[in-house]
Amino acid sequence: MPLLHPGDPFPKLTITTTSDQTLTLPGAFAGDFGVVLFYRGSWCPYCNAQLRAFERAGIRVAALSVDDKETTAALVEKHKLTFPVGYGADAEAVAALTGAFVNPRPVYLQSTGFVLDPGGTVVVSVYSSGAIGRLVPDDVLGLVRYLREHAAPATA
């Protein structure tokens, strides 16, 4: 499982959301910066806090876990999440694509986050092997602001 590094293209990953929408990443963010979050599950207080914080951040986000549809829908409702939240992830398949760490028993994805540029390229990847160590919205917003301010001017 190779880790994704800055400059790597984010692999094609299809998620199904609680609203029965199928979303393909990174294409769903095309033309804009975006954040992909893998969270441990609705039972994780750190994950809940991270999802709530990104809801308030004002940046495009898609999140994914191994939780079932009902559990994920309850999480979305509880925190009034408006960004796409996928469910039923195949932890091993996602790990093979992205390098995310998998907890063996019970099986779930450890917290993993990616900031993607408008072309779907990884700008930052954050891998956690436990409950803590994850993307923070204020850091992401500051980075995106910096990148937008220092972007090379478009050529005609």
Image (tube, rainbow, N blue to C red):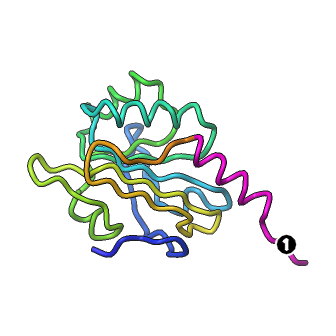
Q: Which residue is at 23% across, 39% downward?
A: 68
Q: Amino acid at mark 1?
A: Ala
Horizontal and vertical percent position of residue 34:
57, 53
| Residue 116 drawn above or below residue 140 | below
Quarter-of-image position of residue 138: top right
Residue closest to the far top: 78
Can you say which quadrant of the picture contains the C terminus? bottom right
152 inside magenta stretch: yes
Q: Position of residue 33 (x, y in %)?
A: 63, 56
Q: Is residue 141 above or below residue 124?
A: above
Q: Is the N terminus in the top left, top right, bottom left or bottom right quadrant? A: bottom left
Q: Residue at x 66, y 48 (%)?
A: 142
Q: Position of residue 128 (x, y in %)?
A: 32, 53
Q: Mark 1 = which residue? A: 154
10 to the left or right of 110:
right
Point out the stretch of residues depicted in magenta: 138-156
The secondary structure that dominates the magenta segment is: helix
In the image, 67 versus 4, the foreground residue is 4
At 56% across and 69% down in the image, what residue appears? 121
